[in-house]
Amino acid sequence: MNTRTAPELIPDERIRRLRDAITADPGTPVRAGILAPGGYGKTALLADLAAIYRNAGVRVASGPEELDEPGVLLVDDAHLLDSATLRRIRERAAADRARVIMAARPWPVPDGLRELAGALDGTAALRPFDRAQVGAYLAASGVPGRPGLEEFVLAQTGGVPAFVERLARGLDPSTEDSALTVPATAAAELGAEVEALPAPVVGFLLAADQLGGVLHVDLLGDLLECDREAVGEIAKAALATGMTDQGGRLIPIVRLTIRTVIPVDRRTAMRQRLADAQLARGPAWAERVSLAGDLDTALRVADQVLASPEAPQHGAAARVAAAALAHRGQLGSSAELFRWAGTGLTNAFAVIGLIGTGAFAAAEELLGESISDGPPTLLSGAAALMARGVHASVSGAPAEALTGLVRAASLLEPADPGMLLPDSPAALAAIVAVQCGELDVADSVLQRAVRAGMGGAPFAVRHRLLRAWVCLTRGDLSAARERLQNAGAARAAGGPLPPRDWLFAMALEVGLARRTSDLNALRRLWARAGDAVIRHPVDLYTLLPLGELAVAAARLGDSERLAAHLDSARSLLDALGNPPLWAVGLHWNGVHAAIVAEEWDVAQAHAAALSAIPGELGRYPAVLAAAARSWLSVVRGEVDPEAVEGVARDLHAAGLRWDAARLAGQAAIRTADRKAMVGLMECARVLQGESAALDRDTSSEPRAGGQLSERERQVARLVLAGLTYREVGDRLFISAKTVEHHIARMRQRLGSTSRRELLAQLRELLGQAG
């Protein structure tokens, strides 16, 4: 076992300021409280402060028996003290120039603790480590760095310092190339702590393990055999141990420990009790947990109801299971269950699933029947509009399709967000709008859906991911990245994304890496992206991410990985009669994937397919067709500057800013005409939204103090990211030779004697610049 001595815990900024103030003036009055669950570093912090005081010659009192001693009073575990002792501490804190620092867990709260906290100048609530703090702690512990280590430790420990410390001690430096796993020693140590907890808290941890991502007070009451108030108190006690997060969910290393130390028969009994409780609550319970974002539990409960002949409400259970299956990417099974349920509402949802999987004749048959046999509610009206809108998108009426889907989204905006849906009309409207080139419509309908909370927790991520997709399509990469991060923050229940959302999220990350020429990131993401594709069968509503991943696959020379999925996509479109609205995006991405792979016949076939799309679909396909033809000419070295600029400006007007700038930039570096090259590069910068002045000579003139110009900072950042001069030039729409000149000027100005020294100086300068 690793016997290294662990370093001090890494404090955050608030605690650092407290330490610095005490170090600067140990005699200054201090009345502070530190509040945090177990394992967050309260004891270590008090020990650190005690050392600071003692080094300054200040007497340190700690236990209740030292309350009358002079100096500074540092009190740990104040939540365990009796009311008389807490009153004496409060009286001492009230004295002039008192120095009192107390630490406590958030539970229990004995009589007198709140009054003591009120007598202090403030209370600092310690928080888990973030990624940077985890990295700092591991480095200070002497743990060798390796790819993914910080993320692994943070994910397993939730950033709880005591758990981070255990993993740091248990990780063996000699196995740095092996798979990252939680050391057995860490789980064993934690197991002893779990076994020492009060029985109700252990029961709560065991129940939380069985419930997974979303905890429900009523169900916890069933499992723990107590009322809601008692459940609340037990949950507070569990949180105070540091073994759960604020939502009561287990820290992963604790879940692993629970499954190790709790006997199998006890865990099995809890699992059976959970199954019985869920079955007794029936479809209503399944719908409730689904709307809370726990789709796995919803599907499991609904399936239990369907499998039990005695259980009531099979139709309601089928609807819950069908909606959950749609989120999980099983659109065919979802449509089958909706159709089996046999109501007008479920038939409408079945139509969407059937068309999405290529069963057009079956969908038309259902449309001929009643899809609105119940009362004319907002939900039934929206579902009927969704079904007819999706049908119109395939039958050749794109304007009708988009209008119907937008109207469906508008109907649900004022409705109760707690409506169980297989997909939201806003999401479908946005996907259709992107395929039509109506990016403003897509963003508008999604923005309203987010504001209204349409569809509840299951759609909080989906709507935000699609907003990020609109930004990616436009070429607004910073906004796309920000919205992708917002989607991650909105992740339902903090659990893993369902396959449909994960596929979009991975395609967004891959798309951002490709557009920023970050080949290292693209390679790191690719395995996960491939896994996301495998987990999600091809359907009509995921052609956008599939097309994006196809281009990335070509870029990485791994097109074979997606070959079967692209074949399935083509077969799906064939089954639907090759609807132009849904084919246009796949052909556009197909052109680019084929160009990257140098498969010229394939690229030509995709370009011809775009050119053959009828005019009634609008101007967008014609713009893409012209751009595809222009790309093929450019890569053959046949550059007509005026024609390229015209096509690029049409792409820009259609909303595809990055594609427009990319086309002009690639044409610029492929023409031998110097004047044409300058003009096309200028065009590329303007279309990308950059000032043309950035690359003029004045932008690269030396500045006072050896600072870098704006263009030089751009070049430096990309070079430090590992891009070649050609890749940097592609990104900034300048030639590789110009990049080389920028590097040479920076090296001369900074006095660098080698490339290695230059890179070190650039890192320092860019770090200072933020």
Image (cartoon, rainbow, N blue to C red):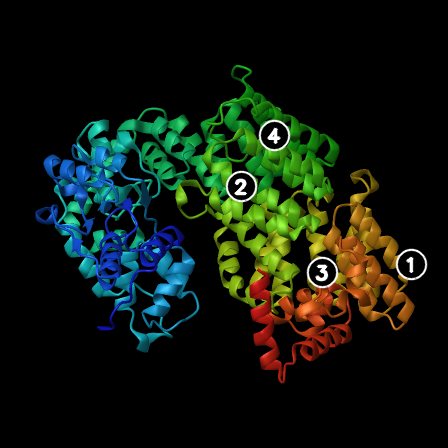
Residue for point 40% across, 55% down? 130
Q: Nearer the viewer, mark 2 or mark 4?
A: 2
Q: Is residue 688 left or right of residue 35?
A: right
Residue at the farthest left position: 65
Task: State the image quarter where residue 637 is shown.
Answer: bottom right
Q: Quadrant of the C terminus?
A: bottom right
Tell me which label, 1 or 4, sits earlier in the chain: 4
Q: CA distance from mark 3 to mark 2?
A: 27 Å
Given residues 405 and 392, the one toward you in this image is 405
Q: Quadrant of residue 694?
A: bottom right
Q: Which residue is mark 2?
A: 462
In the image, residue 509 sits, relative to residue 109, either above or below, namely below
Can you say whether 587 is above or below 415 in the image? below
Label disc, if present, on residue 386 of the rendered structure: 4
Q: Which badge, 2 or 4, is on the more N-terminal residue?
A: 4
**Nearer-the-camera pick, 398 or 260:** 260
Question: What is the x, y in percent for residue 230?
Answer: 19, 30
In this picture, is 285 found above or below 698?
above
Disc 2 residue crowd, few under 14, some 14–19, many 20+, Cα 10 Å: many
Q: Are marks 3 and 1 in contact (CB under 8 Å)?
A: no
Bin the neighbour count of mark 3 within 10 Å (Cα to Cα): few under 14, some 14-19, many 20 and up: many
Tell me the quadrant of the picture where the N terminus can be found.
bottom left
Q: Amino acid at mark 2?
A: Arg
User: Amino acid under label 1?
Assistant: Glu
Does residue 488 appear to the left or right of 428 in the view shown? Answer: left
Q: Secondary structure at mark 4?
A: helix
- Distance from disc 3 to disc 1, alpha carbons, whole Å, reads 22 Å
**Which one is earlier in the sequence, the residue at label 3 or at label 1?**
3
